[in-house]
Amino acid sequence: MTFAATILTLYPEMFPGPLGVSLAGRALEEGKWLLDTLPIRDFAADKHRTVDDTPAGGGAGMVLRVDVLAAAVDHALAAQPDSPILAMTPRGRPITQARIRQLAAGLGVIILCGRFEGFDERIFAGRAIEEVSVGDIVLSGGEPAALMVLDACIRLLPGVMGAPSSGAEESFEEGLLEYPHYTRPVEWEGRTIPEVLRSGDHAKIAAWRKQMAEDDTRLRRPDLWERHRDVRD
């Protein structure tokens, strides 16, 4: 089955966006993955196509209505009943490479993109929706975050990347940051490529790369390093 992505959004024109070029764009043209956008406004019940309302209890901003959201989600689920639904929100659980691998191995995903002050909380009680965050930042809407999640999934699909091993040693795949890379010229502004990488000794190169991945992770991302040590031990 082809990986199918359905995006529930107020701005369908934002897709495929960057996913329409490079590896993802070529894979889309070749039918290695499918994209559908559902405008949330199409599921509004009134003539003004209202999708939001003032927050209960007062406060600034507007909140996406639960009845409109539910209608959009139900429509998407009718077409993709076995696909997980993600809602992009800073209140969600930070997504991991392990979760991305699970999604990419499935039939596809439905992604709900928020706007304004977010979602009426009852949508998460009434529907099986996984709240997902891409980091401790606040965006204008869920669309850029959805593009990030889809990009991470698409590159793992069969036939998308040039070599099957291309993604095996990248950051987060083994719980570590990726080791540093070098290329020609051998010397640049007095800085040279590490000698071990020019040695031709593949065992030494592999050991160096492993050590550098561990050192960089320990120094740059101590949170990842602690999790890696827990798993390794």
Image (cartoon, rainbow, N blue to C red):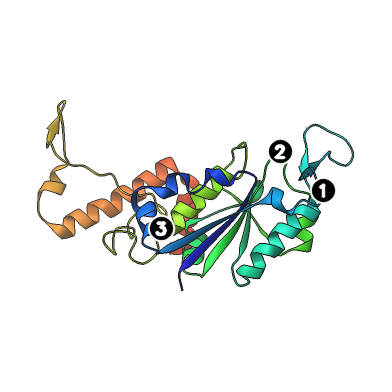
Residue 37 left/right relative to 100: right
Residue closest to the far front: 47
Residue 110 left/right relative to 210: right
What is the C-alpha distance between the residues marked 3 and 2? 30 Å
> Tag 3, which secondary structure?
helix
Mark 2 and mark 3 in contact (Cβ < 8 Å)?
A: no
Label whose residue precedes the other's in the sequence (1 or 3) = 3
What is the three-letter code of the residue carrying label 2? Phe
x and y percentages locating residue 172 in the rendered image? 42, 54
What is the C-alpha distance between the residues marked 1 and 2? 20 Å
> Tag 2, which secondary structure?
loop
Check disc 1 and report the residue beneath it. Answer: 46
| Quadrant into which the C terminus falls | bottom left
| Nearer to me, 115 or 201 | 115
Name the residue rendered at 41%, 46% in the picture: 218
Q: Nearer the viewer, mark 1 or mark 3?
A: 1
What is the three-letter code of the residue carrying label 3? Leu
| Nearer to me, 94 or 60 | 60
What is the C-alpha distance between the residues marked 1 and 3? 35 Å
Q: Nearer the viewer, mark 3 or mark 2?
A: 3
Check disc 3 and report the residue beneath it. Answer: 28
**Which numbered disc covers residue 123?**
none
Check disc 2 and report the residue beneath it. Answer: 116
x and y percentages locating residue 180 in the rendered image? 28, 44
Mark 3 and mark 1 in contact (Cβ < 8 Å)?
A: no
Density class for disc 1 (Cα within 10 Å; few <14, some 14-19, many ≥20) is: few
What is the three-letter code of the residue carrying label 1? Asp
Label whose residue precedes the other's in the sequence (3 or 2) = 3
Number of labels in the image equals: 3
x and y percentages locating residue 24 in the rendered image? 39, 53
